[in-house]
């Protein structure tokens, strides 16, 4: 197998800043697609992972799983891509493909664990996988997505994680017209969730801790915006929601949102804070509420989501940054100061 050295940004420990590093990529095998990365979104998971907040990080850590790029080379048995095509890669680059969950199109719940785009065992080169904060990546074509024509490429990158992670649970729990849906947290995931919930025809209520995001919440599609620190405003919504999607990255009171659900309503967590979230039993028992979770989405569903976005003109609101500004961007992410997804212009790493 041939290999090449490519430029990347990496964390060498939980406390070190991201810095330039050269990593090894495999040359494309028969089923592989080699992609020149044009844009990579900055997910809060990148920061959780690089700082070992989920206690499983393998260093050297090259984050990045919201990848849009152009195909440069393909293996001899690749049928769906050719050099020059636009393509995208999300959070997974492989899975066992044979377990019941993979067979059902839920590769993200592979019983042998999917190979994540970064921080997973690299079955080709040994060691572990490196993500999209780099100039290129080589991925089996079964895990490469098509980018529909007409989408802004930089603003499409966040759809590969923030998009599918919010689209999948809204679809799974079948939100639609006549339903009242809450979105908690107006960050990268939350702002795309607002767009999807609106496009699916629901009555959308955004919950935010940031009063300065009210106008944006309405512009992005929310019918109502509630500042969650306002106890009276929260009280008005008690027991009234069919579905709530919680996309908060840090410790917060989940009971405040469970109590907003009506009978048989569901609160689905997609946020992945470092610390456990205590749940008060009676908030679930009365009146028979569901507390659920959801992780990204399968490959076929990710393609469906991209096609839906192209048909409905949905992309992320982004702030384009050069790779060299990534540490500053992460500081701002922690201060809830992102409008609403940082996307790295990878040309900055090549120059
Ligand atoms: P983000 O852009 O940083 O947004 C998080 C939002 O949460 C903030 O904008 C803020 O919204 C709210 N928030 C932050 N700190 C808070 C606090 N202390 N109390 C209450 N609200 C707070 O992050 P993201 O990239 O959207 O990711 C959100 C979470 O989802 C992360 O934990 C990430 O790891 C996780 N995630 C999970 C999956 C999955 O498959 N389940 C996939 C991707 C990401 P307001 O200012 O509006 O309050
Ligand atoms: Zn992500
Ligand atoms: Zn599997």
Image: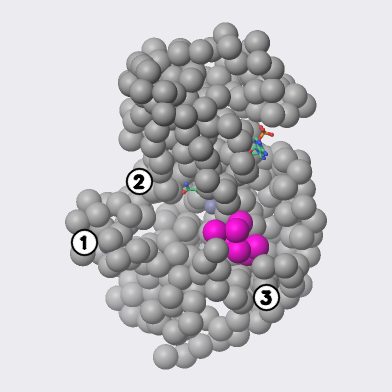
Q: Which residue is mark 3?
A: 12
Q: Which residue is mark 2?
A: 301
Circle 2 crowding by C-alpha within 10 Å: few under 14, some 14–19, many from 20:
some
- Cα separation, mark 1 vs mark 2, equals 18 Å
Q: Nearer the viewer, mark 1 or mark 2?
A: 1
| Residue at image coords 33%, 75% | 31
Q: Closer to the N terminus: mark 1 or mark 2?
A: 1
| Residue at image coords 45%, 84% | 125
Q: Which residue is mark 1?
A: 99
Numbered disc 2: secondary structure: helix
Which quadrant contains ligand 3? Answer: bottom left
The picture places residue 179, in percent across and down from the top left corner, at: 40, 16
Circle 3 crowding by C-alpha within 10 Å: few under 14, some 14–19, many from 20:
some
Numbered disc 3: secondary structure: loop
Numbered disc 1: secondary structure: loop
Q: Nearer the viewer, residue 250 or 79?
A: 250
Circle 1 crowding by C-alpha within 10 Å: few under 14, some 14–19, many from 20:
some
- Residue 189 visible? The answer is yes
| Disc 1 C-beta below 8 A from ligand 3 | yes
| Residue at image coords 51%, 37% | 278
- Cα separation, mark 3 vs mark 2, equals 34 Å
- Residue 38 visible? The answer is no
Residue reaching furthest to the front: 281
User: Does 144 appear above or below 314?
Assistant: below
């Amino acid at each position: 197998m041939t290999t090449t050295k490519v430029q990347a940004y990496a964390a060498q420990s939980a406390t070190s800043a991201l810095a330039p590093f050269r990593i090894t990529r495999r040359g494309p095998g028969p089923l592989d697609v080699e992609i020149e990365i044009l844009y990579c979104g900055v997910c809060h998971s990148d920061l959780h992972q690089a700082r070992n907040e989920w206690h499983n990080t393998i260093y050297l850590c090259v984050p990045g799983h919201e990848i849009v790029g152009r195909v440069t080379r393909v293996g001899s048995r690749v049928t769906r891509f050719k050099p020059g095509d636009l393509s995208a890669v999300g959070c997974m680059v492989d899975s066992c493909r044979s377990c019941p969950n993979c067979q059902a199109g839920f590769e993200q719940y592979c019983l042998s664990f999917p190979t994540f785009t970064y921080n997973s065992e690299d079955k080709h080169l040994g060691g572990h996988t490196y993500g999209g904060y780099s100039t290129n990546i080589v991925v089996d074509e079964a895990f490469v997505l098509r980018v529909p024509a007409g989408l802004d490429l930089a603003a499409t990158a966040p759809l590969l994680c923030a998009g599918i992670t919010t689209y999948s649970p809204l679809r799974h729990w079948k939100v639609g017209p006549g339903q009242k849906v809450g979105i908690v947290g107006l960050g990268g995931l939350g702002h795309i969730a607002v767009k999807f919930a609106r496009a699916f025809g629901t009555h959308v209520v955004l919950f935010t801790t940031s009063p300065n995001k009210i106008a944006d919440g309405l512009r992005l599609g929310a019918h109502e915006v509630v500042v969650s620190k306002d106890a009276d405003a929260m009280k008005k919504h008690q027991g009234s929601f069919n579905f709530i999607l919680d996309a908060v990255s840090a410790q917060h009171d989940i009971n405040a949102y469970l109590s907003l659900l009506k009978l048989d309503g569901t609160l689905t967590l997609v946020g992945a804070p470092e610390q456990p979230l205590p749940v008060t039993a009676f908030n679930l028992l009365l009146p028979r509420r569901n507390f659920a979770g959801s992780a990204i989405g399968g490959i076929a569903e990710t393609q469906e989501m991209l096609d839906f976005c192209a048909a409905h003109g949905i992309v992320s609101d982004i702030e384009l940054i050069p790779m060299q500004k990534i540490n500053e961007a992460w500081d701002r992410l922690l201060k809830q100061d992102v409008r609403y997804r940082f996307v790295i212009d990878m040309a900055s790493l090549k120059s």
